[in-house]
Amino acid sequence: MSSAASPAPRTVLVTGATSGIGWETARLLAGRGDTVIVHAPDQVSGDDAVTRLAAAGVDVLRLRLVVADFSRLDEVRAMAVRIAEEHPVLDVLVNNAAVAAPERRTVTADGNELSFQVNFLAAYLLTHELAGPLSARPGARVVNVSSSMHRTASISWNDPQRAKRYSRLAAYAQSQLALTVFAREKAPWTSVSVHPGVCDTGLLPLYAHEGDPAAEGAARVVRLCDPATELVPGAYYDRTALSPAAPAAMEDRTVRRLCKLADQLVTAESA
């Protein structure tokens, strides 16, 4: 049941929905009757994802495809504008899109380290750009699909782009810590972060040789999207359990500092 006065159908945006946990999350949510906005990095992979969802039994009338390459912040903004115009009410945003940091440090056209931008800055920008639809109805939720790897991380405040010392694991972990911290920003909606478990997705090599099926990780994400599941605002969930996040993620000072940094980086454009 929606928390709205009448049981209106819910609208959910899932980023990174062309494969892995994102695709399975879209499948499960659409199966529950939600309208699911399926985000893809390009048209071809998006069309393919929708075709596979239909083949899996999803009613395509419940799906809306949007396209944006998260390594380009202008595309994130353009996507947010389109979503806000077509969906003035957004009940859930699942910030799931992620890439593994490459072996060699890679910088986007916006001047940011690739994994920091795709995994965190794009989610930060998108969430803020969709503040109107997310605030339109009480009970909206933002679920940041993070990682237990955030516990190994630190945010390199003096060098967030890792220009001086780059390690793909450190860069990836930093992006996951930032996403976990971001869930604690005060907002009119309820934000949480979740480690969905080590799953058999494209990111698996960062963690282990084998993992849970992506559908199991997605079920843990979908549980947090469900209005029947009570959430602790700003909390971190390890699979289905409320869990203490890394100490750095629990500090209000860190939240303010990170949001200030993110504001600077997403407004810098391609300077």
Image (cartoon, rainbow, N blue to C red):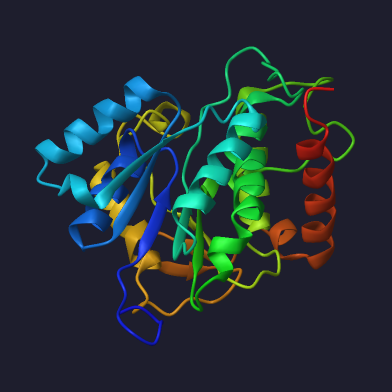
Say whether residue 156 is visible: no
Residue 194 location (% of width, % of height): 48, 57
Position of residue 74 in the picture relative to residue 87 (left or right): right
Residue 71, relative to residue 95: is it above or below?
A: above
Residue 267 location (% of width, % of height): 80, 38
Residue 237, relative to residue 169: is it above or below?
A: below
The C terminus sits in image quarter: top right
Residue 226, relative to residue 111: is it above or below?
A: below
Of residue 7 and residue 19, the one placed in the foreground of this image is 7
> Quadrant location of residue 64?
top left
Of residue 262 and residue 180, the one placed in the foreground of this image is 262
Residue 116 location (% of width, % of height): 66, 34
Name the residue: 34% across, 79% down.
228
Say whether residue 49 is visible: yes
The N terminus sits in image quarter: bottom left
Residue at the bottom extreme, as displayed? 5
